[in-house]
Amino acid sequence: MNPLKIIQKYYQIDSKSYQFLVEHSKAVTKKAIEIAKKVPHFNPDLKFIEEASMLHDIGIFLTNAPEIECFGKKPYICHGYLGREILEKEGFPKHALVCERHIGVGISVKDIEEQKLPIPKKDMIPISIEEQIICFADKFFSKNEEFLSKEKNLDKD
């Protein structure tokens, strides 16, 4: 599996959305691998983490986020389940779950209902150690142009 080839099926290589997605995903991948290596006793699958980290945000192009040249019709919060649909269609159901479950630190049905979120009503909580690591690593980075590959200090937020 080559994550960049999959991304390139959906994004123009010279687009701002591609640049944002790939730069963000590379930073998340690096951080996720770093984290995974610190917990060898959980036996995380490093190859899977590398692939899924690169693909976790593939659904952003289907959302309305013009600041990163994404001109889809759905709210940004939908990119997780939209990414799941893409990767399921590509034949990667395990990677697809990472897309769906990485939003926030996971979203429960209760959260979806209480906040009236425009996403399917189902638990979208990271379960596997790989999903948890990628979800955590993602929190260190923003898609804000100024801070795209600069790691956040989580103590401040």
Image (cartoon, rainbow, N blue to C red):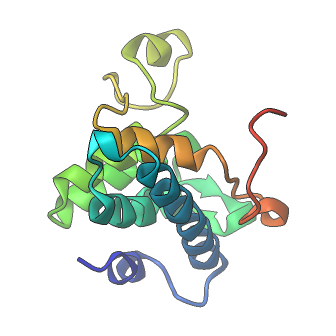
The reply to whether residue 75 is in sight is: no
In the image, residue 121 sits, relative to residue 13, either above or below, namely above
Q: For residue 133, what is the image quadrant? A: top left
Q: Is residue 87 left or right of residue 40?
A: left
User: In the image, what residue occupies the spot 31% across and 40% down?
Assistant: 41
Image location (x, y in percent) of residue 58: 43, 62
Image location (x, y in percent) of residue 140: 66, 48
Total numbered labels placed on residues in the image: 0
Q: For residue 66, what is the image quadrant? A: bottom right
Q: Nearer the viewer, residue 116 or 150?
A: 150
Image location (x, y in percent) of residue 97: 28, 45
The reply to whether residue 108 is in sight is: yes
Identify the residue at the far front of this view: 41
Q: Quadrant of the C terminus?
A: top right
User: In the image, what residue occupies the spot 38% across and 16% down?
Assistant: 109
Identify the residue at the far left of this view: 91
Q: Is residue 146 left or right of residue 66?
A: right
Q: Is residue 91 left or right of residue 73?
A: left
Image location (x, y in percent) of residue 39: 40, 43
User: In the image, what residue occupies the spot 43% across and 10% down?
Assistant: 110
User: In the image, what residue occupies the spot 49% across and 15% down?
Assistant: 111
Q: Is residue 58 left or right of residue 147?
A: left
In the image, residue 100 sits, relative to residue 110, either above or below, namely below
Q: Quadrant of the N terminus?
A: bottom left
In the image, residue 99 sits, relative to residue 27, either above or below, namely above
Q: Nearer the viewer, residue 131 or 43?
A: 43
Q: Nearer the viewer, residue 85 or 118?
A: 85
